[in-house]
Image (cartoon, helix red, strand yellow):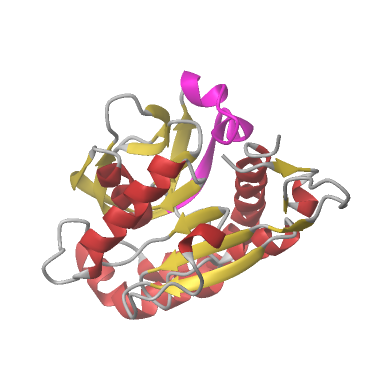
C-alpha cells in the first residue's frame, strides 16, 4: 500500500530517508483509464488536482502504451464505456486490462473502478460481470449497507444518496469482497481487500458528460421509454449537487491510503 502522509490536500509519496539526506517527497501520480473519449475522469480530474496529485489519462482503447511506467502510479481509476466486459473479441484490449488490474490487485495498488471499470475489476479479482435483469439509466437511489457504513470510503455517504446510472451489466463481486451499497437493481459498490473499490454508479459525471451521452444515445433511450429530454434538462442542477458527492468520495479514497 502507498506510504502517504499528510492531509489529502497534499497527497505525496515520501521516499525512504537516507543517511545524511533530507527525506524527499513528490506528488502521487494517478492513472485514469479512459475507454472512450466522452467517458473520462470528469469531476475526479478536479478531485485529483485538489488532492495535490498528478493525473495521467490512458486512452486504453486507442493504445497499449501506458503514459508512463506502471510502477510510477500510486493509484489507478478505471472508468466506464459502452462496451461490455465479455466483448473481448470485439475489443481486444479488454483481456489485457483485466490482466493489468490483476497485477494492481496483487501489488495492492489503490484502485477505484467506475461502471465498466468496476466490472473489469470484479473479473480481475475472480468475480463475474453479467447482464442485469434490467438496465439502470438516470438518477437512482443508492443505499449504503451495514458493512458500507463502516467502510472508510463509502461510509462517508451513509445512509444513502442519489447517483447517475447508465449500465445494463452488473457486478457479482468475488468471494471475500465486501458489498458496500446497493440499489433496487444490483450491487452498487464493493471493496476488494483493503485497497480496491468498485462503484457501479457514475460519480464522475458532469453536465457536459450527460449531454454527450444523450447526444449519442438519446434516440435509443426514447424508444425504451427513458425520458432523455428530461435527463438533459435536469443535468446542470443534478450534476452540481452530485459534484459534492464525487469530491467527498475521492477525498475518502485518498484518506483511506494516508498513513
Report the front residue among 12 and 248: 12
Task: Report x, y in % for residue 49.
Answer: 70, 64
Report the front residue among 143 and 175: 175
Residue 127's place in the image compared with 26, above or below, is: above
Return the residue found at the far front: 19
Q: Please give the range of residues in magenta.
A: 146-164
Q: Is residue 101 visible?
A: yes
Q: Quadrant of the N terminus?
A: top right
Q: Is residue 152 magenta?
A: yes
Residue at the image point whose x is 75% and y is 47% from the top: 8
Q: Is residue 93 magenta?
A: no
Q: Describe residue 10's horizontal placement relative to residue 206 as left or right.
A: right
Numbered-mark total: 0
Residue at the image point whose x is 50% and y is 64% from the top: 32
Q: Describe residue 192's horizontal placement relative to residue 31 as left or right.
A: left
Residue 215's place in the image compared with 220, above or below, is: below
Task: Report x, y in % for residue 41.
Answer: 53, 66
Q: Describe residue 232's horizontal placement relative to residue 42 as left or right.
A: left
Q: Describe residue 126's horizontal placement relative to residue 189 as left or right.
A: left
Residue at the image point whose x is 79% and y is 44% from the top: 7
Report the front residue among 148 and 48: 48
- Rendered image quadrant of residue 185: top left
- Rendered image quadrant of residue 206: bottom right
Task: Report x, y in % for residue 197.
Answer: 46, 41
Residue 87's place in the image compared with 154, above or below, is: below
Residue at the image point whose x is 42% and y is 53% from the top: 114
Amino acid at each position: 500500500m502507498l506510504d502517504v502522509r499528510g492531509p489529502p490536500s497534499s497527497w505525496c509519496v515520501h521516499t525512504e530517508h537516507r543517511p545524511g539526506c533530507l527525506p524527499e517527497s513528490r506528488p502521487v501520480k494517478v492513472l485514469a483509464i479512459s475507454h472512450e473519449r466522452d467517458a473520462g475522469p470528469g469531476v475526479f480530474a478536479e478531485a485529483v488536482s485538489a488532492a495535490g496529485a498528478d493525473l495521467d489519462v490512458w486512452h486504453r482503447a486507442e493504445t497499449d502504451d501506458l503514459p508512463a511506467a506502471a510502477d510510477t502510479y500510486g493509484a489507478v481509476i478505471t472508468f466506464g464505456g459502452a462496451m461490455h466486459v465479455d466483448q473481448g473479441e470485439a475489443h481486444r484490449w479488454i483481456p489485457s486490462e483485466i490482466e493489468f488490474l490483476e497485477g494492481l490487485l496483487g501489488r495492492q495498488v489503490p484502485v477505484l473502478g467506475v461502471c465498466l471499470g468496476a466490472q473489469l475489476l470484479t473479473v480481475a479479482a475472480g468475480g463475474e460481470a453479467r447482464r442485469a435483469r434490467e438496465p439502470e439509466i438516470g438518477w437512482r437511489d443508492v443505499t449504503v449497507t451495514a458493512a458500507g457504513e463502516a467502510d472508510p470510503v463509502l461510509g462517508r455517504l451513509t445512509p444513502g444518496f442519489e447517483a447517475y446510472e447508465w449500465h445494463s451489466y452488473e457486478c457479482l463481486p468475488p468471494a471475500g469482497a465486501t458489498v458496500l451499497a446497493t440499489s433496487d437493481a444490483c450491487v452498487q459498490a464493493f471493496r476488494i481487500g483493503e485497497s480496491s473499490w468498485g462503484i457501479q454508479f457514475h460519480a464522475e459525471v458532469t453536465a457536459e458528460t450527460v449531454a454527450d451521452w444523450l447526444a449519442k444515445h438519446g434516440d435509443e433511450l426514447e424508444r425504451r421509454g427513458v425520458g432523455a429530454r428530461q435527463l438533459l434538462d435536469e443535468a446542470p442542477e443534478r450534476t452540481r449537487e452530485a459534484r459534492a458527492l464525487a469530491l467527498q468520495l475521492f477525498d475518502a479514497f485518498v484518506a483511506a491510503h494516508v498513513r
